[in-house]
Amino acid sequence: MTPGAGQDGNGSRSTSGPDFRALFDATPSACLVLDVDLRIVEVNRAYLTATVTRRQALLGRPLFEVFPDNPAFPAADGVRNLARSLHTVLATGRPDTMALQRYDIPAGPDGAFEERYWSPVNAPVHDGTGTLTHIIHRVEDVTEFVRLRRTASRRQRTAAEQHERVERMEGELLARSIEVQEANQGLRQANEALTTAGAALREQQEAKDLFIATLSHELRNPLAALQAAGELLALDIPDSHPALTVLQRQITHMTRMTDDLLDATRALTGRLQLARERLDLRSVVTTAAEDMLPEYTRTRRRLLVVVPSGPVPVEGDRVRLTQMTANLLSNGRKYTRPNGTVELELETAAGSGGTDAGHALLTVRDDGIGFAPATAGTLFEAFVRAAPAADTTTGGLGLGLPIVRGIAELHGGTVEAHSDGPDSGAHFRVRLPLASPAPPPARRSGEPAAAGRRPPLRVLVIEDNADLAATYRTLLERNGDHVTVCHTGRAGLAAADAAPFDLVLSDLALPDVHGHDVARRLRETLPADRTRLVAVSGFSRRADREGSARAGFDAHLAKPLTLTALERLLARWAGDPSPWPRGAAGTDPS
């Protein structure tokens, strides 16, 4: 026999702690220890005595394999009730006390079972990191009590002491049984309700995101063809045409609503992603104003822009801040009557007191139709309009201002609206944190000055929409580029194997090979310092852009792709000190 912790090898007393294994084995309560797979890893003598079993027959075996339900008892529910309690402990990490249970035990090798009753408690055991590693299953054999109660009922015992004892024990057990059952049932119902509600909300959110993304993709494909066709018509009709003007205006309007639908969902859920950089907010404001000026001129509204003489540094996403400013200017134009005025003012509050200190203030004022002061807070909710727009030629979904709020808050800022009432105009103010001015970047040795017109490029277009592909070819060739068009992924790969290209524009939803697979295979053969890969797709969520980057694309542009957007990207790459592109394109690879 191995000496316990209380003795040394010579039988003398030791100063170490007690032998916990010996204490566990001597515990009068019947206990066994289960691992998280509900296999028996230890058992004490009291449990072996109560269940008439041997330790070697139990250790390492699944609990319910050793103690199955009595097949001769049709109403047996011991396995089900005990399993439910054990899984509750595993799920919650908390003890679970069971109601009085009938759980028969095997009584011999002939398969007979003995009727037994138990009062079980299941308790978790956690390690030093808080991880649940074992469950202690402790039971009290109350079979004699149940039999005594039955005997008392049959013989109608009159002894007051025996009757009182039975009644007291029965009342205590039944009361505990009811309390435990009610508590466990309430916990189960609450847990099931929370689990179901959470899963339903996640499913609804995922379904909504997928629906909006798919709708955006389906709308952008025809819009892309219309956009490209409109640009081509504009090149062929230098003096313009009234119908072309309407076409371009409505395409722009439809594109903006499609983008708003997708962006508003991201902004309202806080999932709009930012590509932060240090920038001068003045350039953002002036760019947005220049983009909106033609629309102001066409609808006979005046736009005034006031910016400070010094820089207004912020940390933010240039594209999203431009979008925020454009949405405010678009809102001001819509709710201002012809010949009215909208003023865009940018100022800093670096040295002032109050909540404005250390912030850039972007204010858009108009002398338009205004709104009731009480409705100011609702204007930034989705699909809400304060009043019918003064300009009825361009509608909207009521998503522009919610996007403004989402972008401002993601930049750590706020936005507020104010009006003194109908016909008194309105102003919207965005407050954004200022960033510390950054030192001017050192010019690299030998770096060229501002780039001029980019050289012609050898371009491979992989697009299954024949109309869109043909229009891309015409637009790019008008710019002097040499263009090869393929309508399938395999054809595009074959063309890239046959001749070199500076630029590859590839759709993702190709009929034979996914655009990501096309990019991966092109990256295996094309030199990264000579060829840029651009994904063009109606899907433009963050996950879509990340998937394109992982596949090897250098950029991901959303449909409808405008020649202006593409040229901006190419101009940025042309000014990059990296080796691409190094010279004019050669002969037409087609």
Image (tube, rainbow, N blue to C red):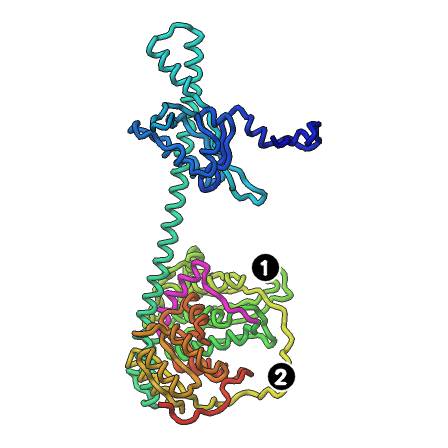
Left or right position of 130 against 17: left
Residue assigned mark 2: 444
Question: Magenta stretch containing residue 263, yes or no?
Answer: yes
Question: Which is nearer the eye, 540 or 7?
Answer: 7
Q: Amino acid at mark 1?
A: Thr
Q: Secondary structure at mark 1?
A: helix
In the rendered image, which quarter is residue 228 located in?
bottom left
Q: Which residues are magenta?
A: 252-277
Q: Which mark is residue 164?
A: none
Assign the C terminus to one quadrant of the image.
bottom left
Location of residue 237 with respect to 347 vertically, above or below: below
Dot 2 lies on which element?
loop
x and y, in percent, of residue 276 in the image: 53, 69
Which one is nearer the viewer's eye here, 26 or 398?
26
Residue 341, how many percent across, how many down?
A: 44, 73
Q: Main secondary structure of the magenta part?
A: helix
**For residue 29, above or below residue 467:** above
In reply to whether residue 114 is colored magenta, the answer given is no
Q: Is residue 417 left or right of residue 310?
A: left
Q: Residue at x 40, y 23 (%)?
A: 117
Which amino acid type corresponds to the residue marked 2 in the rendered image? Answer: Arg
Front tag of 1 and 2: 2
Residue at the bottom extreme, as displayed: 587
Disc 1 and disc 2 in contact, CB within 8 angstroms: no
Identify whether 134 is placed above or below 277.
above
Spot occupied by residue 491 in the image (x, y as percentages of width and height): 33, 81
Circle 1 residue = 355
